[in-house]
Amino acid sequence: MKEIKQDSYRIAPRKMQENEQYKKGRGAQLNTRNRFLKDQHVQEHVEGIDDWSEKQEPTQYIEQEAKTLVNKVTSPDVGMWYSMNPYTGCEHGCIYCYARNTHEYWGYSAGLDFERKIIVKTNASQLLRKFLMNPKWECVPISLSGNTDCYQPAEQKYRLTRSLLEVCREFNQPVGIISKNGGMVRDLDVLKEMARKKLVSVLVTITSLNEDLRRVMEPRTTTAMQRLKLIQELSQEGIPVGVMMGPMIPGLNEHEMQRIMKAAKEHGARSTAYTFVRLNGSVKLLFHDWLYKNFPDRADKVWHMIEQSHNGQVNDSRWGVRMRGEGDIAEIIAQQYRKYGKLYGMNTEELDVDTSSFRRPGVQGRLFD
């Protein structure tokens, strides 16, 4: 088994200790160090005898008035121009999530803090309205959930995503949504109206149809069957919907690609997308710890296959390569994607949204009366 290192932080693979309690309902099992903080209290050796104690903390919602909401996306390989995220941190707890590292900018850990300290941008809709009213804005689609899931459990209480959709509907601003949460059905009324105007498209993420894997890899997410049901409901209402299969992880879920695509097609999905796992920043440490605790029988194999697909590393920052991987394993997955996409008739049409009908309420109306 291989010890890994990031900066001054080492972590050795190990099985669960007899006196160690697995944190059910959480993806991360520890808080990694925050690279921006000089002094911090972290638990590096759970088997050690000291005064460390950690309670099963409930999720904490930290309400905040943000300064900005819409961000320009400079990465050329993620398929979006701008993104907006009403929540920072995500209670879904997906262990592979690349967005975990962003929590360090707020003074928190990418580990357990990311899942249970959720920053809520209470003024999100006001910020979006102000952004769209700027006469310099030239309408292009904005993505919801470019970072964290906009339909995570916090949405049940705050309804920020719905308020953003309502603003977009008012301005005829097109949006693309990526989510793995069935709570999206609460907003079918708004989504249907936007779909009639070609203002919305949706990608539902399905990483595995294996519930045993989902429970530990994405512990607080909707089941795969509920996500398929969501695809079906969106499709039946005329809302363009596809399936996002990501990330594909060799030795864990990559063999499910065909089954996922077939099931998604049968439930009404019209398009597909996928990503290959990459473990950036602290996610490397968190995933490593999770992998050896949950799958000790194949952890070495999975880890080495990820390394083989990223030039000997588990992360690759090169645009055009980082999201797909390279080498034999990554190419086999890419071949599966092309083969089954063609077999099931996916991606045969462009899911374009309409940017020509954008309007600023109360401004253009007066100009052209």
Image (cartoon, helix red, strand yellow):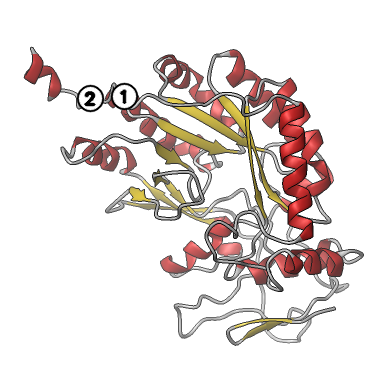
For image coordinates 20% across by 27% down, the residue present is: 360
As rendered, which of 157 and 3 lies closer to the eye?
3
| On screen, residue 234 above or below 332 | above
In the foreground, 44 or 74: 74
The reply to whether residue 215 is in sight is: no
**For the C terminus, which image quadrant?**
top left
Res. 20 image quadrant: bottom right
Q: From the viewer's perspective, tell me whether residue 309 is left or right of residue 292.
A: left
**Total numbered badges shown on the rendered structure:** 2
Q: Residue at x 71, y 73 (%)?
A: 312
Are the residues flagged by discs 2 and 1 in contact, CB closer than 8 Å?
yes
* Residue 304 point in image, percent of width and height: 80, 69
Residue corresponding to mark 2 = 359
Task: Give SS at disc 2.
Answer: loop
The residue singled out by tag 1 in the image is 172
Please say whether residue 104 is visible from this viewpoint: yes
Left or right relative to 298: residue 92: left
Question: Between disc 2 and disc 1, whose residue precedes?
Answer: 1
Which amino acid type corresponds to the residue marked 2 in the rendered image?
Arg
- Quadrant position of residue 228: top right
Looking at this rendering, what residue extends furthest in the right direction?
297
Image quarter in which the N terminus is found: bottom right
CA gap between label 2 and label 1 equals 6 Å
Place of residue 327 in the rendered image (x, y in percent of width and height, measured from the top left): 74, 61
Rendering coords of residue 69 (x, y %): 33, 48
> What's under tag 1, amino acid-wise?
Asn
